[in-house]
Image (spheres, rainbow, N blue to C red):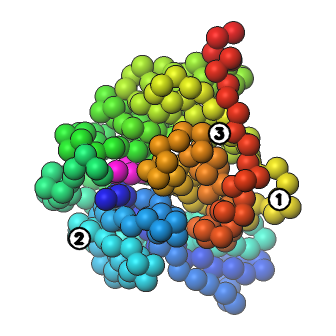
Amino acid sequence: MIYTITFNPAVDLVMSLEQLNLGELNRVPEQHFVAGGKGINMSVLLKRLGLDSVATGFIGGFSGQFIIDELASEGIASHFIAVDGQTRINTKLKADRETEINGAGPIVTQADLIQLTAYFEETLTAEDVVFLAGNTARGMDEAAYQAVAAVVKEGDARLVIDTNRQLLSNTLQYEPFLIKPNEQELADIVGQSIESKADIIKYARELQHRGAQHVLVSRGGDGAILLTESGAIYEVGTPSTTHRSVVNSVGAGDSMLAGFMAQYLATEDMARSLQFAAACGSATAYSTGIATRDLIEELVDDITVTQLDHLEKE
């Protein structure tokens, strides 16, 4: 089974209006609600690719129930730990200038964390994959993040991590199967500036020496670079001939990571998995929400993967 963890999910209230007038009454002609969070995005993308997953994490109140209901409407199972308080609601104002107001979310206690780790202790097997994505919730610290990573390692499941600099650094000791820092996060982790592809390879290799099995460095519009445990290095670009434009980058990185693992579980082919991952990330960037399978399949053969092993030897 595949599990996705979102410690601090959200309901995004997206409101569109022509102009926002501060201090005055503003009427919104269009609004919609979206279940948000990195792990939730991954579960949605996986489902659209035909893979089942269980979305987990911490959730509370009527806004939390909305997320559970939205996942169920997509056919996605969930096993959230109920906490006191309300799952956060983020307001996204799309006007002449975009404005975001993000809620704080509920406090997660040590008892809540123990419930989640106990669930994984009872459930995980070596056949499972766990996506640990995003930041901690209020009340959690770095040790809490590490506790979940440790349980996944103890269960012999594959651990896939996408989080910020410090949390990512602290989980390398648990030998994650795959990590996905972006180029700036990689620079922050190693405390060095990145000037070239050779620098990306050098510093990503350092993260492998610290425990990561495979390192996928996302580079936005420049694609991504993958270092595999076997020593191979691959680069992938974005679709070369599409006339589509980026609509919204939210969820693109989540789609890339979920797409990579979906293809890897089917083929164990690193190059093909990277190509498919790029298609998933691009498809979501070209969409108003998480990508559809049809668009992903339309883009995948328009993406090129090349080997960069020579850059490390120069």
Tell me the number on the disc at residue 82.
Answer: 2
- Depth check: give the residue in front, 275 or 68: 275
Q: Amino acid at mark 2?
A: Ala
Q: Nearer the viewer, mark 3 or mark 2?
A: 3
**Residue farthest toward the top in the current orientation of the protein:** 314
User: Which quarter shows the N terminus?
Assistant: bottom left
Q: Nearer the viewer, residue 295 or 184?
A: 295
Label 1 sits on a secondary structure element that is loop
Secondary structure mostly taken by the magenta-highlighted segment of the chain: strand
Comparing labels 1 and 3, the label whose residue is closer to the camera: 1
Which residue has dot 1 on it?
Answer: 242
Left or right: 241 as drawn, with respect to 262: right
Q: Position of residue 271 (x, y in %)?
A: 60, 39
In what element is the residue under mark 3? strand
How far is the residue under mark 1 from the one under mark 3?
A: 18 Å
Report the Cα–Cα distance between label 3 and label 2.
37 Å
Q: Are marks 1 and 2 in contact (CB under 8 Å)?
A: no
| Residue 103 shows up from this direction | no
The numbered disc on residue 109 is none
Tag 1: Cα neighbours inside 10 Å, few (<14), some, or many (≥20)? few
Of residues 250 and 287, which is closer to you in this image? Answer: 287
Which portion, as a residue range, is magenta? 129-133
Q: Quadrant where the C terminus lies?
A: top right
Q: How many marks?
A: 3
Q: Nearer the viewer, residue 179 or 213?
A: 213
User: Which of the two discs, 1 and 2, labels the residue nearer the N terminus?
Assistant: 2
Counting residues from the start of the chain, the first of labels 1 and 3 encountered is: 3
Kind of residue at badge 1? Thr
